[in-house]
Amino acid sequence: MHPAAKQTEPPVSYIPAPDRIQFILHCSCINSFVAKALMKFRARILVADDHAGRRERVHTLLDSHFDVVATVNDGQAAVDATARLKSDLVLLDILMPKMDGIRAAQELKRQGQGARVVFLSVQQDQEFVAAAFESGATAYVFKSRINSDLVWAIDRALAGEVFVSPGAER
């Protein structure tokens, strides 16, 4: 490589996961459309749900949009895997064994994990939605609206915006 052509900045893929999204969003040399496309392409998602069939369904839905780095069946496994895999976003069910999704989100927040949190739940009661946001969530999707809302909610969450499936209020 010619010395004048020497690369001064590391490629985006070498930037640690929590900082990568912020770097892409704030980079002044690319427009927001490209930033969102890069963010979506590079986002590392961890899925936590205690139902194997639902984990598989969500993985299949998200796989063409994001990098699904792991699927786990409880909140404690989600916390452990998020730290190990440096996920950009954690998709949590609320009611899971060992550690529920609310406690898992609180623990991720306590540990200072940079991952965004999105809840995917059958619970449509306002109390659950409020508890999810109090625990640090950026989005809340009803399981009945997986196909219509999930990818959009994740995009919004990665952009730092709030999303709640229609029919509930934050």
Image (cartoon, rainbow, N blue to C red):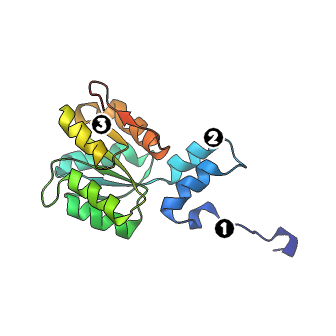
In the image, residue 124 lies at what x, y percent? Answer: 20, 32
Asked if disc 1 and disc 3 are in contact, CB closer than 8 Å, the reply is no
Q: Does residue 61 show up?
A: yes
144 vs 102: above or below: above
Q: Nearer the viewer, residue 168 or 142?
A: 168
Q: Nearer the viewer, residue 97 or 125?
A: 125
Query: Disc 2 versus disc 3: distance between alpha carbons?
Result: 25 Å
Query: Disc 1 versus disc 3: distance between alpha carbons?
Result: 36 Å
Q: Which label number is shown at residue 10? A: 1
In the image, residue 146 lies at what x, y percent? Answer: 30, 35
Under circle 1, the secondary element is: loop
The residue at the point 85 percent across, 75 percent down is: 3
Q: Nearer the viewer, residue 134 or 128?
A: 134
Query: Residue 7: which quarter of the image?
Result: bottom right
In the image, residue 79 lies at what x, y percent? Answer: 28, 63
10 Å crowding of disc 1: few (<14), some (14-19), many (20+): few
In the image, residue 118 lies at what x, y percent? Answer: 33, 45
Mark 1 residue type: Pro
Q: Which label number is shown at residue 32? A: 2
**Looking at the image, which residue sits at the far top?**
167
Asked if disc 2 and disc 3 are in contact, CB closer than 8 Å, the reply is no
Q: Nearer the viewer, residue 166 or 64?
A: 166
The residue at the point 75 percent across, 69 percent down is: 8
Q: Which label number is shown at residue 55? A: none
Query: Disc 2 versus disc 1: distance between alpha carbons?
Result: 21 Å
Q: Which image quarter holds the C terminus?
A: top left
Find disc 3 in the rendering and name its residue: 141
Under circle 2, the secondary element is: helix
- Position of 133 with respect to 5 (left or right) is left
* Label whose residue precedes the other's in the sequence (2 or 1): 1
